[in-house]
Amino acid sequence: MGGRHGKDKKKKNKEGQVFIDPTGKANGRGAYIKLDNQEALDAKKKKAFHRAFSMEVDQGFYDELIAYVDHKVKRRELGLE
């Protein structure tokens, strides 16, 4: 988590839904995570988004996040991004 460079944004909207926002343009409170597989795994282990959004975040979100980050890392390695 931290600054924005090389990271994607995760959001929490007014309804309390936490979701991935690759565009960074969706309404709601945001938190960033580095596009790195280990960072995504650490976020799940440390429940980083529980703290960032001051609420219980479904474990399914972390699984979705890990899959998303892995996909983005592979695309970057192939030179597609």
Image (spheres, rainbow, N blue to C red):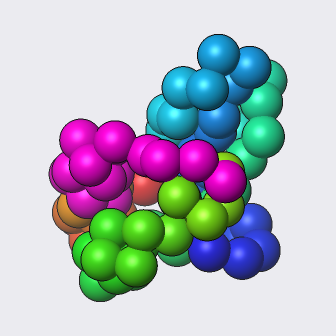
Residue 66 to residue 13: above or below: below
The residue segment tinted magenta is 54-69
* Quadrant in the picture for the C terminus: bottom left
- Taking 47 as reference, is 3 left or right? right
- Taking 23 as reference, is 4 left or right? right
Name the dominant secondary structure of the magenta segment.
Answer: helix
In the depicted view, which residue is nearer to us: 6 or 31? 31
Q: Which residue is drawn at 44% across and 46% down?
A: 57
- Taking 37 as reference, is 1 left or right? right
Q: Residue furthest top?
A: 15
Q: Position of residue 37 (x, y in %)?
A: 28, 75
Q: Position of residue 6 (x, y in %)?
A: 61, 70
How many numbered callouts? 0
- Residue 69 can be seen, yes or no: yes
Q: In which quarter of the image is residue 75?
A: bottom left
- Residue 7 can be seen, yes or no: no
Residue 54 to residue 23: above or below: below
Q: Residue at x 24, y 41 (%)?
A: 60
Q: Which residue is drawn at 73% across and 47% down?
A: 30
* Quadrant in the picture for the N terminus: bottom right
In the rendered structure, does residue 67 fall within the stretch colored magenta?
yes
Q: In which quarter of the image is residue 79?
A: bottom left
Q: Where is residue 16 in the image (x, y as percent from the top left)?
A: 61, 26
In the rendered structure, does residue 45 fall within the stretch colored magenta?
no
Q: Which residue is drawn at 53% across and 35% down?
A: 18
Q: Where is residue 28 in the image (x, y as percent from the top left)?
A: 77, 30
Residue 55 to residue 41: above or below: above
